[in-house]
Image (cartoon, rainbow, N blue to C red):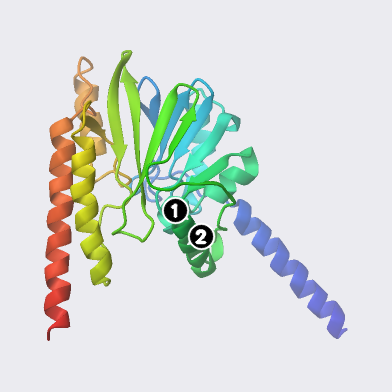
Amino acid sequence: MKYILISFLICLFSVSQSYAKEFIPEKTDKNGYVEPFQMFDDLFYVGDKWASSYLVRTTDGLVLIETLESPYGRWIPSNVEKLGLNPSDIKYILVTNGHSDHVGNAEYIQRHYGSKVVMSKEELQLAKEQSTKSKGKGHFEAPHVDVFVKDGDHLVIGDTKFTFYITPGHTKGCVSIDFMVKNAGIPYRAFMVGGHSPSKTDIKLVGEFIKSMERIRTIALQEPKVSVNLANHPHKNHLFEERALGINDSKKNYFIDSKGFFEFLNKQEEIGKKKLAELQANANK
């Protein structure tokens, strides 16, 4: 009887884990759901209210950048379908850092569509640590990484070239991504800064964050200058406000905003310096 009970509990646990693994939350405003929309000829937003996820259409399939918090990123495949595209065409998943709101659904999408995951070795380790802390319907597994990127690496997918920079400060191996998008056939340079806030407790990382923002500014000023800010949290690049402006003025793409991108960098550096001063003051007490 004892062994039957143990076997029953094991089966019950397995069913529960399987359910959690495939659970898809309801698409509601309370859950942060946002209808997907097109930003450029070849770039789409498939994220939610709190974390960004972008889909890039290349001549050799789709590239997904960021995968949201589990389980909410499980909306991404149906969002891709709403855009008239096929989630089975997601060839690569690019992840900037190992925090759950960025990597939380990479394994889910990889498991269902065979997508290759691209991130840094440091961030995979962080993803594994985050995975062990995830629970219930929010549980996620760290993905299998097919391509470990290093600073300055390039990845060409069809007609699109992605350049990666290791920009520590938010996390140790945070990855920023640089590539071109098109608006009415005209190319514009887009950039995703991998981490939008410095470490809360690590003075060394905060110092690196400030240096990373300075370095990104230098890189972004190289011609053609960056004019599209793909922040990985929508409030950081005023994504929904810019979309609303575009809906009211279809003659202009308000996502093209070079001035806004550099103002964003200035703001992040300011946040970093404020945090550094705070940590230094506490250390001297």
Looking at the image, residue 118 sits to the left or right of residue 192; the answer is right
Q: Position of residue 73 (x, y in %)?
A: 48, 46
Which image quarter holds the N terminus? bottom right
Looking at the image, residue 250 sits to the left or right of residue 30; the answer is left
Q: Is residue 100 above or below residue 113?
A: below
Instruction: Tell me which corner region of the image, top left, top right, bottom left or bottom right, holds residue 47.
Output: top left
Looking at the image, residue 27 sits to the left or right of residue 211; the answer is right
Extreme right residue here?
1
**Going 13% across and 47% down the picture, which residue do you hit?**
266
Q: Position of residue 158 (x, y in %)?
A: 50, 23
Q: Which residue is mark 1?
A: 69
Q: Position of residue 279 (x, y in %)?
A: 17, 74
Say what secondary structure mark 2 lies in: helix
Looking at the image, residue 65 sits to the left or right of residue 78; the answer is left
Q: Position of residue 138 (x, y in %)?
A: 51, 60
Q: Closer to the camera, 6 or 153?
A: 153
Q: Which mark is residue 279?
A: none
Instruction: Tell me which corner region of the image, top left, top right, bottom left or bottom right, holds residue 163.
Output: top left
**Going 44% across and 47% down the picture, which residue do you hit?**
95
Residue type for callout 2: Gly
Residue type for callout 1: Glu
**Going 11% across and 77% down the picture, which residue do you hit?**
281
Q: Which residue is mark 2?
A: 138
Q: Are marks 1 and 2 in contact (CB under 8 Å)?
A: yes
Q: Is residue 24 visible?
A: no
Query: Mark 2 Cα within 10 Å, few/some/many (few <14, many 20+)?
Result: some
